[in-house]
Amino acid sequence: MPHERGLFPERQDDQATDRVREAGQDPSGHRARLRRRLLHGGDDALADHELIEALLMTVIPRMDVKPLARMLLQRFGSLAGVFNADPRALQAVPGIKEAAAAALRIAGVAARRLARAQVQALPVLSSWQALIDYLTIDMAHLNHERVRVLYLNTQNRLLLDQVVSDGTLDESAIYTREIIAKALSIGAAALILVHNHPTRPF
């Protein structure tokens, strides 16, 4: 019978190369420990800066990204602020290139879509907390006023969530005629007007 090593030599060589590469990039084993905590721990297994760090590790393989993760949190104020930041603002941070900005952007988009899916699954008025959570993910980090309209059908399910105005620090325009026209055009039975303040979520 052939020697066991000879059965899949290329696969074993690849595995050995991966181990050497991993050891060269992370001699302390920090990245591996972080991944294990992420995969086997609960939702709170990683702190906010560690979640950002774990994400950056996938696109910045040969750099200690912990200081960068902390810098992003400090710059944008919160996890939501980082994940919802404008890509140009992200790339203005030293060490953040296009790939890293895209990875952070993906996290923000995915979070909003998951939250929106929960809102769409049930009548809005019977899932008020899910609605608040969804709006908080999208709006709590903003440093300007935003007005959005949630258009509902006769079962109070979400037909359309539309941002109708992005304003300044302390004001945002509302065009009632356009809102009503949109409601009529999509057959909305009711609507909810949402308005934030930069100093507090809503």
Image (cartoon, rainbow, N blue to C red):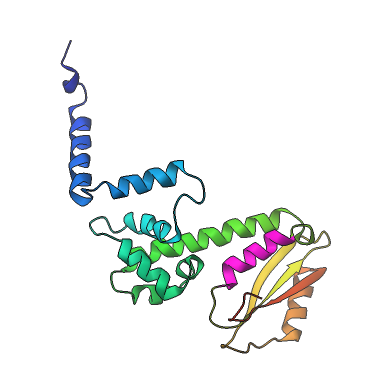
Q: Which residues are magenta?
A: 128-140
Residue toward you, 70 or 108 = 70
Taking the image as shown, residue 105 lies to the left or right of residue 14, namely right
Furthest residue to the top?
Answer: 1
Tell me where residue 69 sits by quadrant: bottom left
Q: Quadrant of the N terminus?
A: top left
Residue toward you, 65 or 116 = 65
Question: In the image, what residue occupies the spot 23% across and 50% down?
Answer: 26
Taking the image as shown, residue 80 lies to the left or right of residue 188, namely left
Question: In the image, what residue occupies the spot 58% across and 69% down?
Answer: 138
Q: Quadrant of the C terminus?
A: bottom right
Q: Is residue 133 magenta?
A: yes
Classified by dominant secondary structure, the portion drawn in magenta counts as helix
Pinpoint residue 162: horizontal percent, then vertical percent: 65, 72
Residue 116's place in the image compared with 195, above or below, is: above
Tell me where residue 196 sits by quadrant: bottom right
Q: Is residue 154 magenta?
A: no
Pinpoint residue 5: horizontal percent, then vertical percent: 17, 22
